[in-house]
Image (cartoon, rainbow, N blue to C red):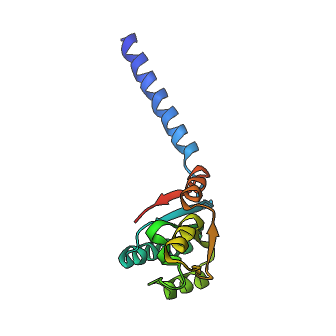
Amino acid sequence: MQHSTNRSGFARLLATGTATLAALAAPASGAATSKNHRIAFHVDRNEPAVMNLVLNNMSNAATYYAGTGELFEMELVAYGPGLHMLRADTSPVKDRLSSIKDSIAGVTFSACNVTKLGMEKVEGHPIAILPQARIVPAGVVRLTELQESGWSYIKP
């Protein structure tokens, strides 16, 4: 009989400890969870469907986080053939980029300078990047920096 009592005592102790841990891990009722979501989007294809998909993803994420009151930052990094997305002369989505930049705070568009210089060499003329974008030294390096800083990586 003593053996049975020890088992039920252990079970009660285990249940109490588990309930205590669960209560400590759960956020307090009504407490705001303030998390800053940081999302890096990668575009390396010159495909309007991909460009529109990434802009849809950015808009949807912004709408969601604005609705929850949570903070967010988003950065789109374009390189290789994807740089056309941020080129003033070839972007099929320049109006959407302008609209998103104007309406959503915390959005950055980054254009790869390595790709830009390569395109200029091949095409034989300077390439203008849209005013909503900034030039970064190398797109792959920028994505690496973002990921190493804890940003979530999305490639549509």
Look at the picture and state if 155 lies above or below 27: below
Q: Does residue 29 sit above or below 73 in this rendering?
A: above
What residue is rendered at 55% in x and 49% in y?
26
Picture coordinates of residue 28, whole percent (x, y): 60, 54
User: Depth check: 145 or 34 in front?
Assistant: 145
The furthest residue to the top: 2
Residue 133 % position (x, y): 60, 76
Q: Can see residue 69?
A: yes
Q: Is residue 138 left or right of residue 92?
A: right
**Quarter of the figure that contains the C terminus:** bottom left
* Furthest-bottom residue in this view: 95
**Most distant residue in the front direction:** 124
Q: In the rendering, at what x and y percent does residue 124 appear?
A: 53, 77
Q: Residue at x 45, y 22 (%)?
A: 9
Which quarter of the figure is the N terminus placed in?
top left
Relative to 109, 15 lies left or right: left
Residue 68 seen in this snapshot: no
Q: Quadrant of residue 105?
A: bottom right
Query: Between residues 1 and 123, which one lies in front from this camera angle?
Result: 123
- Residue 87 coordinates in the image, percent (x, y): 53, 80
Pick the residue in front: 95 or 87: 87
Q: Residue at x 46, y 76 (%)?
A: 55
